[in-house]
Image (spheres, rainbow, N blue to C red):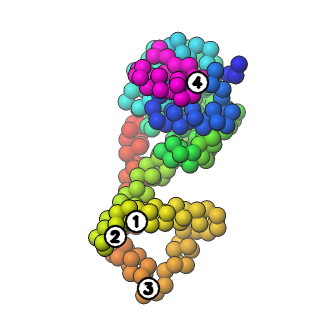
Amino acid sequence: MSKKTVFIGGGNMAEALLSGMLSAGVVEADAVVVTDIREERLSELREAYGIQTSTNNTEAVAGATEIWLCVKPQQMADVLSPLKGLADSARWVSIAAGVTASTLEAALGGEVRVVRVMPNTPALVKCGVAGVAAGSRANAEDVQSVKTALECVGKAVVVEEPDLHAVTALSGSGPAYVFYLIESMMAAGEKMGMDPEVSRELVLQTVIGAGKLMEETGLAADELRNRVTSKGGTTFAATECFDAMGVGAGLTAGTLAAAARSKELAGE
C-alpha cells in the first residue's frame, strides 16, 4: 500500500488535486482518505474515485504521511484545534490564503513540517498554476514533493512565503481578472449586435490563443501587443481608449490591492 494521504475538506479544489494526483500515480486510491462534514459529498467522491472517506478528522490523520488542508481560512482554527499533537511526522500542506506557516505550526504543535500552497481555479481543468512556499521546518524534499503533486494539475513555482501575497494577487485572483476582461469584451460584442454565443466563442478563443502565443513564442507581452498595433489602426484606437480611461493603471492598482488585502488577512 502507498503512503497514506489525507485531504481535510472535500471541495472542488481538493477534488481537482485528488483527481490529478490519482491520474498521475502520485497517490493510490486505497491509500487516500478525504474528510468532510457533508456525507453526500463524501459519497460522491467515493463513487467517483474509489477512495476512503470519513467525517472524523482525528481518526483520518492517524498514520498519515501527507495531509492536505483544503478548508477555508476562517475554518482553519476550528479544524486544527483537535489535531494538535497528532500526525507530527506527517507533511502538512495548506491551500488556505492568508493563514501563515507559523500560525499553522503553532496550532499543530510539535515539530510539524508545513508547506503552504496558493493554487488557482484552472487547476479544475488541469491548467492551473500554484505558488509553493516552505514553512520553517519543511525541507527541500517536502517542497519538491508538493510541487510534483501540484504539477499534476498544471504548473507550480517555488517562492519564499512572503511572496505568496503576490502569488495570491497575480495568479490566485488572476483568473477573475481574465473573466472580467472576457465579460467586458462580450458586452461590447453584444452592443455591436453580435449573437452572444458567437461573441463568447470569438472572445474565449482569442484569450486562449493569446496566452498560447505568448507561451510558445517566449516573447514579452508588449512586443506581441506592438506587433498587432498599427499607428492609426483599429487596435491602436482601442488601446488609446484603454489608456485614456485608465484600464491598464486600474488593473495594476487592483492587483496591488489584492496583495494588500492578502497581507491584511494574514495579520501583517
Element type at mark 3 = loop
The mark that comes first in sequence, 3 or 1, is 1
Q: Which of the two marks, 4 or 3, is nearer to us in this view? A: 4
Corner quadrant of residue 75? top left
Q: Is residue 22 left or right of residue 240?
A: right
Q: Earlier in the sequence, mark 4 or mark 3?
A: 4
Foreground: 157 or 103? 157
Q: Which mark is residue 198?
A: 1
| Label 1 SS | helix
Mark 3 nearby-residue class (10 Å; few <14, some 14–19, many ≥20):
few
Answer with mark 1 or mark 4, whichever residue precedes in sequence: 4
Q: Residue at x 39, y 66 (%)?
A: 199
Q: At label 3, which amino acid type do we have?
A: Gly
In the image, what residue type sits under mark 2? Met
Where disc 2 sits, the SS reads: loop
Position of 167 compared to 194: left or right?
Answer: right
Q: Which residue is mark 4?
A: 50
Distance from Cα at disc 1 to Cα at disc 4: 40 Å
Give the CA distance from mark 2 to mark 4: 46 Å
Task: Tell me where residue 31 appears, x and y as whole percent.
Answer: 64, 21
Q: Earlier in the sequence, mark 2 or mark 4?
A: 4
Identify the residue position indicated by label 2 in the image: 194
Q: Which residues are the magenta region?
A: 32-56
